[in-house]
Amino acid sequence: MTATLLSNAADQSLRARAAKVVPNGMYGHESTILLPASYPQFFQRAEGAHIWDADGNRYLDFMCAYGPNLLGYNNRRVNDVATAQLALGDTMTGPSPHFVELAEALVGMVSHADWAMFCKNGTDATTMAMTAARAQTGKRRILVADGAYHGAAPWCTPIPFGVVPEERAFIAKYHYNDIASLEAAVAEAGDDLAAIFAAPFKHDAFVDQLLPDPAYARRARELCDQTGAMLIVDDVRAGFRLIRDCSWELVGVRPDMSCWGKSFANGHPISALLGNDRCRMGASQIYATGSFWFAAVPMAAGIETLKILRESDYLEQSIRLGTVWRDGLDRAARDHGFVLRQTGPVQMPQILFEDDPDFRVGFAWGEAMLQRGVYVHPWHNMFFCAAMTEADIAFTLDAADYAFGAVRAQLGSLEPHPVVMMMLGAMAGEH
Amino acid sequence: MTATLLSNAADQSLRARAAKVVPNGMYGHESTILLPASYPQFFQRAEGAHIWDADGNRYLDFMCAYGPNLLGYNNRRVNDVATAQLALGDTMTGPSPHFVELAEALVGMVSHADWAMFCKNGTDATTMAMTAARAQTGKRRILVADGAYHGAAPWCTPIPFGVVPEERAFIAKYHYNDIASLEAAVAEAGDDLAAIFAAPFKHDAFVDQLLPDPAYARRARELCDQTGAMLIVDDVRAGFRLIRDCSWELVGVRPDMSCWGKSFANGHPISALLGNDRCRMGASQIYATGSFWFAAVPMAAGIETLKILRESDYLEQSIRLGTVWRDGLDRAARDHGFVLRQTGPVQMPQILFEDDPDFRVGFAWGEAMLQRGVYVHPWHNMFFCAAMTEADIAFTLDAADYAFGAVRAQLGSLEPHPVVMMMLGAMAGEH
């Protein structure tokens, strides 16, 4: 089969208009500035497992909106509830009864949790966790794994332009899964340790993913118990994608707080901080609020999403399909002489190419997949959703066979992406 | 007329459940912890100018969700657009074309703006303004008026439990409308001034509101021009409630950036930072993002809301009705021997009682108004919405006549609110 060049006139026209009225034309994690040139910036529609770009090209979408799409875009049950609630009331002068019901549902599902607070951004939840930990302990030092993404606020943004160093005072680093480095960071904190942050697994961009070593997770728990610090699992990205509970139940470790967002209302805007009674006092002291935090629609959508998560086999299906996908991609790559580094849980896969330090092969493969109607990401972990089918996986593997062949054919003439080169240079300079 | 005691069994039951699964039972600006005991915490419905609490009691709502309700709850035009867009796509793997259209609409309406960035919380917009100003100028000092609310992040939260002083380094204070204090703060910043923040008018809680002195606004502009600093108007609360432009157009002063939120999508969750080309570079350098920031539904709702703002007389009507309300309340208060301090724009009124330092009279009046079906706030500015009618104002003035009489009758036996007393004590300790 041959690839057809996709039309992108509408996307180009929107980019030209955006360049005038948006700094850089776009910003944040959905900007295509670090993606291959043919990746569309704008999308007009999403349904089930598919997205349509501004030019009407359809893609099977393995990004799932960078996480929020868990059950499939426009899930009928969730959106019927949301639409009905919108007519009754959304942002009002106080929260709706759904606030209580959703808090009860999350506390009922997440083993470590005794209480819930809702917010809008994942960053809200991680910032509240940090502040609640400091309020609870009266201590200041916060440990985070180097390279981990915990949000875009001054204390945690990965690109600290405009941030003064004082805003990151007392934020210290350790290496994920490295007990010795964690112990060293705790020792350095002395009697000033407020919290240890951990991602449920290492899902940093541009590098291989790493599952948590249970010994590391247990040691983090012990160190918090010994020092009085709070253990915080940032489940914003992986929440309910690994287990119907906090992700670290899989390694038998219960944090004091966990941060949630993205997908627990299937894309309706809500995030949450959950915690146990060990830090309830700190959580009750902090001031945290936002204009839309008490809105009823995302809470009604969240209650319905959680019901579906409890009743359906969305999780088992994503693991089954993810396994077929991973095995099939490995085979197809080998057939064309490539070695893939596929890491992380199969349902949240990261795909990098061996011997591809500047990502030029991965970028070319992504563009070839895109031409065949499959949206994959060359350096960020991807996501499965419950609307994906065996036919979708077969379609993907067929596209992959084409794409590996296409990349093989043009291997000698590939160029690295200029912005990626700049970024890699900056990252190298940091280390 | 006599007041009937409202049923609150459902609200009490929800509070009891919430106390178990939410720290303090509720948090943030919609918590009733600083409101009279009979104020309901939970609401089940909102339509037009009215809200219904969990027990089905209906109130004419002068809080308008603390701002987001500008055109009336469940505005048909806006919510039809939102519902249709939800079926097409909300949070997707990239922004929709509505992103560009909404940016163009805002830049078209707001005179000082050359560009727009969207986010979710008002706090997101003010934090991005601060960070962009520092990125643009390479300087650190940020001036804010004392008592002004610019959000709940560590750098600006009014209740800094769990915040370390370093997170507020380089945040300095001046007195609103006080040119000498502004000049002194600028002088103290030396060559390190990044930005001056100003509310469009002084709308702090618990105190009289104050319109901006044009000489102060002009001086702030001059000082920014002389030093290279950025002038930032925080229009999150007042945006499009005073003028169909940035609020400081009313005093003839254009900021470099303005922060927006709450109402420009009539309650759908979106906020924005607007700016001019003087700080476009800084805005293009900062990293700012959130899981739901690129969602299409609130942007479609925003485009429709802005259309209605341009086409309708919502603003002129709110000023007309607000004037009737203010005059009528003054008269009714005097009839019962009270003197009101009504401040701020008539469509964003603050009502305090003369000789009521601990708010016990205002609290009692609020409870009496509530019994008659009118939701007023005893210490926060209120809001008009376009769904309010002359009949609503007449209903309110009738209720007010009853409420002033009821408070007069129980004046000797009123007690101050215990949490308010704690808070006033803490505030006094700060000064």
Image: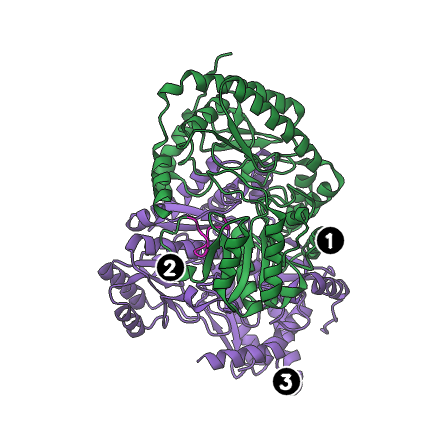
Chain colours: A purple, B green
Tell me where residue B32 appears, x and y as whole percent: 43, 35
Q: Quadrant of residue A169?
A: bottom left
Q: Are marks 3 and 2 on the same chain?
A: no
Q: Chain of mark 2?
A: B
- Check contact, mark 3 vs mark 1: CB within 8 A: no
Residue tagged by mark 2?
B165
User: Crowdedness of circle 2 by 10 Å Cα count: few (<14), some, many (20+)?
Assistant: few
- Is B374 situated above or below B311? above
- Give me the disc on residue A411: 3
The amino acid type of the residue labelled 1 equals Gly
Q: Secondary structure at mark 3?
A: helix
Camera-side residue of B265 and A327: B265
Marked residue chain, label 3: A
User: Does residue A404 appear in the picture of this structure?
Assistant: no
Q: What range is drawn magenta here?
A: B149-158
- Mark 1 = which residue? B108
In the shown orientation, is residue B252 left or right of residue B171?
right
How far, Cα to Cα, is label 2 from label 1? 40 Å
